[in-house]
Amino acid sequence: MNLQDTDPRILWRPDDQEADDQGADVRASGFARLDDAPFPDFTPGHIWLVGAGPGAAGLLTLMGYHALTRADVIVYDALVGPDILRWAPPGTPLEYAGKRGGKRSATQADITLRLLDLARAGRRVLRLKGGDPFVFGRGGEECEALAKAGVPFRIVPGISAGVGGLAYAGIPTTHRVTNHSVTFLTGHDASGGLPASVDWPGLARSSPVIVMYMAVRNLAEIAAKLLDAGRDPTDPVAVVARATLESQTVIETRLGAAGSLAEAGDLPTPAIVVIGPVVNLRDRLHWFKDGLEAGPLG
């Protein structure tokens, strides 16, 4: 049975020659088709928090691209790739507001005040954040401050590295055979230490797959806590660094050995760490590898 014969939502059929002829002309115009698309207006004095995705420029959403080409000023994070910023119109001010562990950087309060000042000056402010603004990206904190100050804002979600980055490593976040749940967590708190609020024994017992952001620094301690709680030391682990980029690196190990690798300084960053049986699927699903024509767009 042809699904096109049963689903009224499919609007184009291969036997519609007129539509096919028109489609050939439209396809030739490429991204120019978006010039007159009815995107929301990026109004002066508004702030858009946009997720830039896990790294590769091609994974930026259409709404994110629209904001990038309309902004008066772009305030961007450390994990936003330069290939994305090149799409900003020439002359658009680019302000770096990156925060990297162990390195001198602007405080969150300074960043928020800068966003408020720019918006109050009537600028179209693009706050460009790696991954998704609401997944360990402090987007919620910034939006709370904007709401309190009465500054209008819009959220443009992005592809989170904990999902998209793992996909580029050939690791599905869920699989019907291996897991019906997954836990996402950050590997450090505001001080850089291990999050005190995490129930590590409960996590070790209940979550077949654990995906951790910013966890390399504390991975030895995290692994020890999970092992002490009864987690199997042979549980597969993958560290996916610089996900979706040409320089992507994937290191596979076991939970019992992950701490030693971390302490030896052998793990690259920035990275996503995943623990659980989905890592074993990489043997069959590893598509982004040698021989694939990789490029800055992903």
Image (cartoon, rainbow, N blue to C red):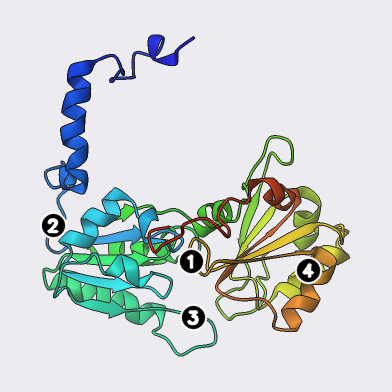
Q: Give amino acid for label 2.
A: Thr
* Residue with the mark numbered 1: 246
Disc 4 versus disc 2: distance between alpha carbons?
A: 47 Å
Point out which mark residue 100 bears.
3
> Is residue 176 left or right of 272 when viewed as pictured?
right
- The secondary element bearing badge 1 is classed as loop
Disc 2 versus disc 3: distance between alpha carbons?
A: 31 Å
> The C terminus is located in which quarter?
bottom left
> Is residue 30 left or right of 237 when viewed as pictured?
left
* Residue with the mark numbered 2: 43
Task: List x then y, in percent, for residue 172.
Answer: 62, 47
Q: Residues within 10 Å of mark 4 (few under 14, many from 20)?
A: many
Residue 227 vs 259, above or below: the answer is above
Specify the farthest residue to the front. 291
Residue 137 vs 221, above or below: the answer is above
Q: Give amino acid for label 4.
A: Ala
Disc 4 versus disc 1: distance between alpha carbons?
A: 29 Å
| Foreground tag (2 vs 1) | 1
Whichever of labels 1 and 3 marks the residue nearer the N terminus, that label is 3
Q: Give amino acid for label 3.
A: Arg
| Foreground tag (4 vs 2) | 4
Q: Give amino acid for label 1.
A: Glu
Looking at the image, can residue 145 be seen?
A: no
* Residue with the mark numbered 4: 223
Proximity of marks 4 and 1: CB atoms separated by less than 8 Å:
no
Whichever of labels 4 and 2 marks the residue nearer the N terminus, that label is 2
- The residue at the point 65 percent across, 70 percent down is 195
| Foreground tag (4 vs 1) | 1
| Foreground tag (2 vs 3) | 3
